[in-house]
Amino acid sequence: MRLYALYDTYAEEFMPLFEARNDALALRAISGLPDTAFPQGTTREDFVLYKLGFFDRDKMCIIPKEKALRVFAPYKSKEVENEAV
């Protein structure tokens, strides 16, 4: 399974990790989040989805990506400066 997290561009920190089989399912997972899932005082435009690595269930280990990879900025109205953080 792949590991993803939403990055808060203003707080400059990641929200908790979640798993998805692929990028499309990760996008589907965040698109259905209610507004209450986001920290108070934020808007959806504050967040970018990143793929952070993989979880190998057979070996029970996390395999990080060398750099976090921006998957999609579905709510972003302004340009995100870097592809990786």
Image (tube, grey):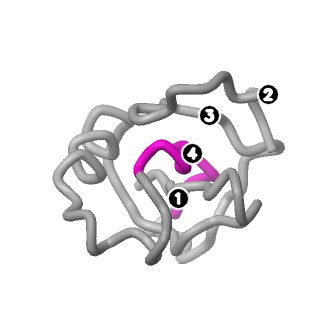
Question: Residue 34: horizontal and vertical position, in percent?
Answer: 20, 64
- Within 10 angstroms of label 4, few (less than 14), some, or many (20 or more) residues? many
- Name the amino acid, label 1: Ala
Q: SS at mark 2?
A: loop
Question: Residue 65: horizontal and vertical position, in percent?
Answer: 73, 46
Q: Which is nearer the N-term, disc 4 or disc 2?
A: 4
How many numbered discs, if any?
4
Give the residue at mark 4: 51
- Within 10 angstroms of label 1, few (less than 14), some, or many (20 or more) residues? many
Closer to viewer: mark 3 or mark 2: 2
Location of the N terminus (image quadrant): bottom left
Q: Is residue 31 above or below residue 80?
A: below
Question: Residue 77: horizontal and vertical position, in percent?
Answer: 51, 27
Q: CA distance from mark 4 to mark 2?
A: 17 Å
- Name the amino acid, label 2: Glu
Q: Which numbered dot is residue 70?
A: 3
Secondary structure mainly formed by the magenta segment: strand
Give the residue at mark 1: 5
